[in-house]
Amino acid sequence: MKPYPDRAAAGRALADELGEVAGSVLVLGLARGGVPVAAPVADALGAKLDVLIVRKLGLPQQPELAMGAIAGVGGVTHTVRNEPVLAEAGEHALADVLEEETRELRRRERAYRGDRPAIDVRGQVVILVDDGLATGSTMRAAVAAVRRQHPARVIVAVPVGGSEGCRRLARVADEVVCVWTPLYYTAVGQAYRDFSPVEDEEVRRILAERS
């Protein structure tokens, strides 16, 4: 049985699991799928909501296999490398994909942010929210990018994830909250009855409603 009807319901369950969070809190939804999950979390906490664009660096011949990931915070892009995959793929493969995905990251930043200033996470408790964890490479890039901007704490919060991925993230985040860790876990979508793609317009609408 899939535990969540949709991403909004998953966000409400995640908010219940988080409970109260002390300090000045900023909730960042990883675009695109993390934003509809992050919105109910921000609402429940009475916190600010913003978007963090993270892009997986997939192998050209196997896009689902990540060579790493990039994330942009405060106008700075940070890269996380998956060295075992890169050892097979080679640096030339990474360079080509990195250039393409950096362009897409900048496009989405312009599309979602418009005239709003870049995210400022300094001194804040940052809650990074996605609709689930697969390998965790994109979330690790998000944590690394946020860390460089000197937040007070970094909390990773997801409705579903694999136990190993959550354990790895616990080494780099101050806290990891994962509501459901299935025994047999193959993909994030297995947790949702409605796992429709999230479009740019939905991200813009959610952010505009809470700006």
Image (spheres, rainbow, N blue to C red):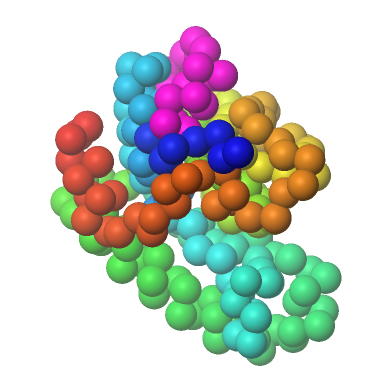
Is residue 124 shown left or right of residue 40?
A: right
**Residue 124 in picture, x, y percent from top left:** 46, 25
**Residue 8 in picture, x, y percent from top left:** 38, 35
Q: Residue at x 22, y 32 (%)?
A: 210
Given residues 35 and 27, the one toward you in this image is 35
Given residues 180 and 82, the one toward you in this image is 180
Q: Magenta stretch?
A: 9-29
Does the magenta-highlighted stretch encompass residue 71?
A: no
Given residues 96 and 147, the one toward you in this image is 96
**Residue 149 in picture, x, y percent from top left:** 50, 41
Q: Count of labels shown?
A: 0
Q: Tell me if I can see residue 72 in this picture.
A: yes
Q: Residue at x 31, y 68 (%)?
A: 107
Residue 86's place in the image compared with 198, above or below, is: below
Is residue 103 shown left or right of residue 98?
A: left
Q: Residue at x 81, y 83 (%)?
A: 88
Indicate the quadrant containing the C terminus: top left, top right, bottom left or bottom right. Answer: top left
Q: Tell me if I can see residue 150 in this picture.
A: no
